[in-house]
Image (cartoon, rainbow, N blue to C red):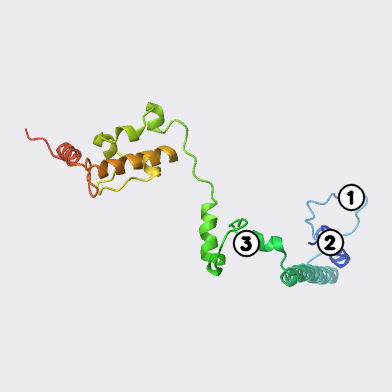
Amino acid sequence: MASSTRPPHEQSATSSFTELLQSSRAQTSHPARRPTNPSTSSTAPLTPGSPSAATTQAQFQSRYALAEKTALEATADRQRLKREQALAELARPYSRRDLEQQIPRRYKLGDVYAPHDLSGTEMGKWRKMRRKPRVVSHGSDVLDSLGVDPRQHYKNFSMMGEYVSEMGRIKHRSETGLRPVNQRRMAKAIRRAIGTGLMPSTYRHPELLRDSLAARAPRRG
C-alpha cells in the first residue's frame, strides 16, 4: 500500500513548479491590479517593441516551459508508481482470504461439491441467493389485516381467484403483496382447491370470467 507522503523528487518538482508559477504571475499581472506609488516607482511602463519587453517575454516563456516540463515529469512519476503498485499486486501470491472472498457460497463440514460448482456461473447463483429480500411494508398484507388463514377457505373460489392469473397461474408475491408465509399458505390453498376440482388449473373460474366479461360489455339502452 502506498504511503501518504510524497517521494522527495516529487516534492521538489512540485515546490519548484509552484515557485515558478507564482513568480510568473507576479511579473505578468495587470498594471491596474498592482499597487502603484508615484514616489517609489520611477520606471516607465514597458512598450511592446522595447528590448526589455522582449527579454521579459523570453524569460516568461522559458519559465513556462520549465514549469510545464516539471508538471509532466511529476505526472509521469505518479503513473509509474501506480504501474509498479499494480504489478506488485499482481505478483503477490493469493492468500486463503483472497480465495474465500471470491466464493460467495459458504461450505460446511460434510458438504459434497463438484468442480462445476466452483465455476463463475454457479457462484453467480449463490451471489443472487445471498442478496437481502425486499422488505414489504408493514400492514400491506391483507390476510394479516383480516386475520384469515387461506387454507381454511380453499372452497371460496372467489378469494382464490384473486390470486390466480387469467391463465390459471398463481401470482407472484410482488403482485399479491403477501408475506412469504401467507404466500405459501395461499398457494397451498389454491392447489388444494384445484386438486378437489373446485377450480380449474388452466384458466380462471367460469363464474369469475362471466362476471368480468359482463362488466366489460357495454350496456344496451
Which tag, 1 or 3, sits closer to the chain's start? 1
Q: For mark 2, give the secondary structure.
A: loop
Say which residue label 2 marks: 6
| Dot in front, 2 or 1 | 2
Q: For mark 3, give the secondary structure.
A: loop
Q: Which residue is rendered at x = 89% and y = 59% of the image?
A: 43
In which quadrant of the rendered image does the C terminus lie? top left
| Residue 38: image tag | 1
Q: Nearer the viewer, residue 73 or 158?
A: 158
Q: The residue under label 3 is which amino acid type?
A: Gln
Query: Badge 2: how crowded within 10 Å, few (<14), some, or many (20+)?
Result: few
Residue 179, visible in the rendered structure: no
**Label 1, label 3: how far apart the Cα atoms are:** 75 Å
Q: Nearer the viewer, residue 152 or 158?
A: 152
Residue 50 position (above or below residue 145): below
Q: Nearer the viewer, residue 80 or 9?
A: 80
Q: Which residue is rendered at x = 24% and y = 48% of the image?
A: 201
Q: The residue under label 2 is which amino acid type?
A: Arg
User: Based on the displayed image, in which of its 4 quarters is residue 195 positioned?
Assistant: top left
Which tag, 2 or 1, sits closer to the chain's start? 2
Q: Residue furthest top?
A: 146
Q: Position of residue 29 (x, y in %)?
A: 79, 57
Q: Position of residue 135 (x, y in %)?
A: 49, 40
| Residue 102: image tag | 3
**Label 2, label 3: how far apart the Cα atoms are:** 33 Å
